[in-house]
């Protein structure tokens, strides 16, 4: 009798461990890798990019039969409704746990993205490891429809190139959904998202032929960063301003900058190997003041002018030039944000909050005005560490 | 008389203290005191240790007796039974709440299509089996689980170290100490080591390693884990997200990604929770059963296991019709209700005992004179 | 309906499986207690499923302890 009970229990366990109500059979789900949100009239237009499993497998790569991904688009009053309506189009249940990127169109972002983020935060299938982008000159739907070559799943390409670009170029930044929510919620900081554009002809980009050329005619490219006031998109940062933003936010891992050579014609290119930023807030005489200290280590990357890089004083000259030039760029960018937009994207408000909580509590409502008149001091410190493998510039003809 | 080794008792205490607290406490603390949630966790620990010291004192004064027996000894047959039955109802209700909480979590996060009652009943079957085999069996199981739990918790902390941004913690103590103290006090009522006290007589004291020491050490370790995890959620998710995600620790573990291949391991965290919540519910139910056995002078609690199991599983369905009533109950009423049983009553026992002994010694002196 | 039936069935199963052994071992008290618990469980469960008035201890606790909890919170605020 006891034996029978034990076997029954074991059988029961085996049956329920494979889950019945919540089973997700691999061939019954469609893996969604990219999501795009646009607006039509008052409704939301949701686009999803789904992996077409048969075509992505290594053996059949390059086959012209069908595309590696499929996109479906559906209208709905909310994201959740649109998702359920998508089942009218898709042959399988959509599975969102492998989402890589979410794209909001510029138009949607201008009206405020908070309502759209709600579903993304609430649903249990969605995680927090995907990046959020704003599409710049086009609808989000079209971003998802462009074919890509090295990474056959465009969403994966966008994901990896954002990570690589974040690593190697200071004008792009990767933002996950939880970080985005945090930035929107914070009172002394604002959200900034990377923008993406379609470079080239859109119609051509949506076909498989686009990937059959050596020189792709249509590409997806990151371009600029969008800044928000709370959850509404207000404007775009150009390349220089995006760099300044990332430097101040301490999210630059490595990058490259071109500057005029000291006391000569021509330009030099330096490679940033390490960048640290410290933002310190303080309140003096009831006035807020912020000190930004940037500490950047560079290697000399490329020289257009003739310099003797074995001399210490040459390197010091380079450091001085870099400090002066970049300091101006940083100060100009901050000034522009202060006067033209009055939006604190750099987190100076948070710095004041950390330094003097009581002052912040009193004045946080009027932070926009205070930010516009904020006294910001920029300290720049460059160090040239290495010069590469050539100790002088390649001989060139001097103009007599 | 069944016995478990003090080390097993300590392990039971650690797993019990971790119990459901990782799931509820960080979010509630962050809602109350934002980025000072970790300080709130520190005060939770302080208050909790205070309660445990009261239990230790009681254990030392009444060696070998369970809480219910202490009540009857101190307050006499009639009043003692009333108090005993109050405690039994507390234990059983606690078991219901724990089961409900676990079921809700699983239903929301991983098995949304599965009917909740199925989750309650299936889990209850496991618990009933654990109880039927007795404290030695589940004590040994806990001993087996323990290294896994510690290993995984350690793994989480190490894996997430790189995502920390210390500035999220500042400014410290912005709103003053009083809200932090209050939230610490409120959260401390989510740990109910009093149930473990009911099991103390089952522990075979081996010299210096007594049940009392095991209780203290176990609670301390469990609370340290709580503080560490709360600190991590604040430092990585930030106070807004910790407060607004219902299960922030789950979100936190989802973020673990080492070298692009060690990722999506949050299901392991859920497995750990199964283990800790299992221990918590088993111990709580066992406490209730022991209470009933002792008050009614039954020979053993075995015949009651299945009926009580059924009762608790059924009540888990009834008790909260939706999550909002659950949150409201947790926010408004649980605090004072639990505090009465966790602290007020045991302290009253202590006071009564002190007074009794004092008065008794007075009389002794008079008689000998 | 199905839920109520299965609940009653489970309770009866438990009774049938355990009571005879208890009767033989002269543990009458246990049988009484166990049956009380089973009856309470079944009545509550069936009542809940059929939306009759059920005994939800939470109500009692809430009405008693909510004011106390508030009072303590106010104490801290003061």
Image: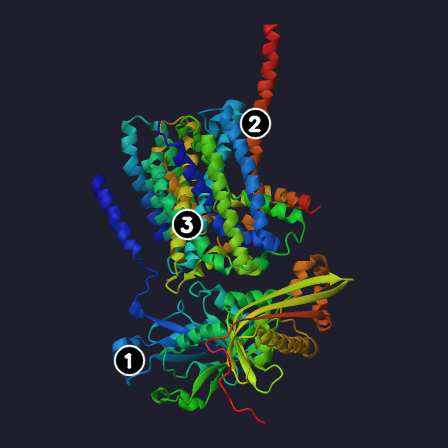
Rendering coords of residue A397 (x, y %): 52, 91
Quadrant of residue B138 within the rendered picture: top left
The C terminus of chain A is located in which quarter? Answer: bottom right
According to the image, label 1 marks what residue?
A61
Q: Residues within 10 Å of mark 3 (few under 14, many from 20)?
A: many
Marks 1 & 3, CB-CB < 8 Å contact: no
Asked if disc 3 and disc 2 are in contact, CB closer than 8 Å, the reply is no
Q: Residue at x 30, y 42 (%)?
A: C13
Q: Chain of mark 3?
A: B
- Residue pointed to by mark 3: B273
Find the distance from the CA under tag 2 to the CA under tag 1. Answer: 77 Å
Residue name at image x 45 percent, y 76 percent: A389
**What colour scheme was applied to this rendering of the protein?**
rainbow
Q: With respect to residue B205, does A179 lie above or below?
A: below
Tags 1 and 3 both on a single chain: no
- Say which residue appears at 65% left-offset and 76% top-offset: A324
Residue B292 position in % (x across, y down): 42, 32
Q: Helix, strand or loop at disc 1?
A: loop
């Amino acid at each position: 009798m006891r034996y029978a009970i034990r076997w029954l229990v074991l059988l029961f366990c085996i049956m329920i461990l494979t889950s019945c109500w919540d089973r997700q059979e691999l061939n019954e789900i469609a893996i969604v890798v990219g999501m795009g949100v646009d607006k039509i009239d008052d409704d939301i237009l949701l686009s999803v990019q789904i992996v077409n499993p048969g075509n992505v497998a290594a053996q059949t790569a390059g086959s012209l039969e069908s595309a590696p991904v499929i996109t479906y688009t559906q209208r709905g009053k909310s994201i959740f409704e649109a998702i359920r309506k998508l089942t009218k189009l898709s042959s399988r249940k959509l599975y969102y746990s492998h989402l890589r990127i979410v794209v909001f169109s510029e138009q949607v972002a201008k009206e405020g993205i908070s309502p759209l983020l709600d579903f993304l935060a609430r649903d249990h299938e969605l995680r927090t490891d995907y990046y959020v982008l704003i599409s710049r000159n086009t609808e989000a739907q079209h971003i998802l429809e462009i074919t890509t070559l090295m990474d056959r799943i465009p969403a994966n390409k966008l994901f990896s190139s954002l990570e690589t670009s974040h690593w190697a170029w200071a004008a792009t930044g990767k933002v996950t959904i939880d970080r985005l929510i945090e930035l929107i919620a914070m009172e002394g900081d604002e959200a900034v998202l990377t923008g993406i554009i379609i470079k080239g002809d859109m119609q051509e980009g949506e076909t498989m032929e686009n990937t059959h050329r050596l020189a792709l005619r249509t590409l997806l490219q990151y371009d600029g960063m969008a800044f928000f006031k709370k959850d509404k998109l207000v404007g775009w940062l150009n390349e220089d301003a995006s760099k300044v933003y990332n430097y101040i936010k301490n999210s630059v891992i490595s990058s490259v900058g071109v500057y005029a050579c000291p006391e000569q014609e021509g330009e030099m290119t330096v490679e940033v190997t390490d960048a640290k930023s410290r933002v310190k807030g303080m309140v003096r005489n009831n006035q807020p003041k912020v000190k930004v200290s940037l500490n950047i280590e560079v290697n000399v990357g490329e020289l257009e002018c003739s310099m003797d890089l074995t001399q210490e004083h040459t390197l010091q000259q380079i450091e001085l030039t870099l400090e002066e030039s970049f300091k101006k760029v940083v100060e100009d960018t901050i000034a522009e944000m202060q006067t033209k937009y009055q939006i604190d994207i750099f987190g100076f408000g948070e710095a004041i909050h950390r330094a003097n909580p009581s002052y912040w509590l009193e004045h946080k409502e009027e932070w926009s005005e205070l930010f516009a008149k904020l006294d910001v001091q920029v300290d720049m410190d460059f160090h040239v560490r290495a010069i590469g493998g050539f100790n002088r510039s390649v001989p060139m003809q001097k103009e007599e | 008389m069944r016995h478990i080794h003090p080390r097993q008792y300590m392990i039971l205490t650690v797993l019990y203290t971790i119990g459901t607290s990782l799931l509820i406490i960080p979010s509630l603390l962050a809602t109350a005191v934002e980025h000072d949630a970790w300080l709130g966790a520190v005060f939770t620990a302080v208050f909790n240790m205070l309660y445990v010291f009261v239990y230790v004192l009681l254990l030392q004064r009444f060696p070998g007796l369970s809480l219910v027996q202490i009540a009857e000894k101190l307050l006499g047959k009639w009043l003692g039974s009333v108090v005993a039955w109050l405690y039994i109802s507390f234990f059983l209700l606690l078991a219901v709440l724990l089961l409900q909480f676990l079921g809700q979590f699983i239903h929301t996060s991983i098995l949304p299509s599965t009917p909740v009652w199925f989750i309650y009943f299936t889990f209850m079957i496991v618990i009933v089996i654990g109880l039927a085999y007795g404290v030695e069996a589940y004590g040994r199981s806990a001993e087996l689980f323990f290294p896994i739990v510690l290993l995984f918790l350690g793994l989480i902390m190490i894996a997430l170290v790189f995502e920390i941004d210390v500035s999220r913690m500042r400014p410290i103590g912005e709103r003053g100490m009083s809200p932090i103290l209050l939230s610490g006090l409120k959260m401390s009522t989510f740990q109910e080591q009093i149930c473990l006290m009911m099991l103390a007589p089952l522990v075979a004291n081996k010299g210096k390693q007594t049940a009392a020491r095991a209780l203290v050490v176990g609670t301390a370790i469990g609370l340290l884990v709580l503080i560490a995890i709360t600190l991590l959620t604040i430092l990585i998710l930030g106070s807004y997200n910790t407060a607004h995600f219902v299960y922030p620790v789950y979100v936190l573990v989802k973020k673990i990604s080492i070298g692009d291949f060690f990722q999506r391991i949050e299901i392991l965290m859920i497995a750990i929770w199964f283990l800790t919540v299992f221990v918590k519910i088993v111990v709580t139910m066992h406490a209730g059963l022991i209470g009933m056995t002792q008050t009614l002078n039954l020979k053993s609690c075995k015949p009651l296991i299945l009926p009580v199991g059924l009762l608790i599983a059924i009540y888990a369905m009834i008790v909260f019709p939706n999550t909002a009533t659950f949150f409201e109950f947790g926010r408004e009423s649980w605090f004072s209700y639990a505090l009465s049983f966790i602290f007020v009553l045991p302290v009253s026992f202590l006071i009564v005992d002190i007074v009794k002994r004092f008065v008794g010694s007075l009389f002794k002196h008079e008689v000998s004179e | 309906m199905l839920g109520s039936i299965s609940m009653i069935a489970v309770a009866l199963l438990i009774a049938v499986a355990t009571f005879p052994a208890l009767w033989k071992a002269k543990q009458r008290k246990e049988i009484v207690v166990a049956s009380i618990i089973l009856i309470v469980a079944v009545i509550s469960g069936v009542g809940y499923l059929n939306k009759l008035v059920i005994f939800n201890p939470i109500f009692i606790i809430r009405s008693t302890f909510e004011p106390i909890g508030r009072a303590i919170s106010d104490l801290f605020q003061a």
